[in-house]
Image (spheres, helix red, strand yellow):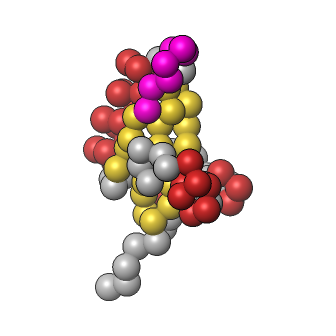
Amino acid sequence: MSQPVIGTLWWIASNLEEAEAWQKELQEKGAFDVGIQTEKDSELVDVLIKLDRATANEVVGYEIEPDEWLEDSYMKEYGTAAA
C-alpha cells in the first residue's frame, strides 16, 4: 500500500463553536488533524485541516480546487498550528 499524500486546507470559522464543530466532524470523517487557532482581537477562527489528498473530497464534502491547498513554503513561513 502506498503512503498517503498529505495536504493542508485553511478554512476560517465565524467563531470558536463553529470551528470546534468542524474539527469534530472532519476528524470523524477521516482528517488526520484539524488545528484551531483563535485570533486575539477577532471572533474569526483559523481552522487548518490535514488530510490525505486521495480522499479529501469525500472528507470535506466537495470537490477541492488545486489552488485551495496550502503550499509547504507557506506552512513553514507562517508556522501554523497544523503544520
Residue 27 seen in the current view: yes
Q: Quadrant of the C terminus?
A: bottom left
In the displayed structure, would residue 67 be above or below residue 1? above
Q: Main secondary structure of the magenta part?
A: loop
Q: Is residue 49 visible?
A: no
Examine the rendered structure and indicate whether residue 33 appears above or below residue 23: below
Q: Residue at the location (55% across, 43% down)?
A: 10
Give the magenta part as a residue range: 37-43
Q: For the point 53% across and 58% down, which residue is it?
A: 76
Q: Position of residue 61 (x, y in %)?
A: 51, 45
Horizontal arrangement in the rendering, residue 47 relative to residue 32 (left or right): right
Please check the rendered image and state whether residue 60 is part of the magenta-colored stretch, yes or no: no
State left or right for residue 68 relative to residue 50.
right
Q: Residue at x 54, y 21 (%)?
A: 44
| Residue, far bottom | 1
Q: Give the side of residue 40 with respect to residue 72, left or right.
A: left
- Report the number of discs: 0
Quadrant in which the N terminus is drawn:
bottom left
* Residue 51 rendering spot, x and y as whole percentages: 42, 57
Q: Residue drawn at (36%, 36%), measured in percent from left and top?
A: 23
69, above or below 42, in the image: below
- Residue 80 is situated, as x and y percent measured from the top left of the image, at 48, 46
Q: Position of residue 74 (x, y in %)?
A: 61, 55
- Image quadrant where residue 3 sits: bottom left
- Image: 38 above or below 24: above
Q: Looking at the image, which is closer to me, 58 or 23?
A: 23
Residue 2 falls in image quadrant: bottom left
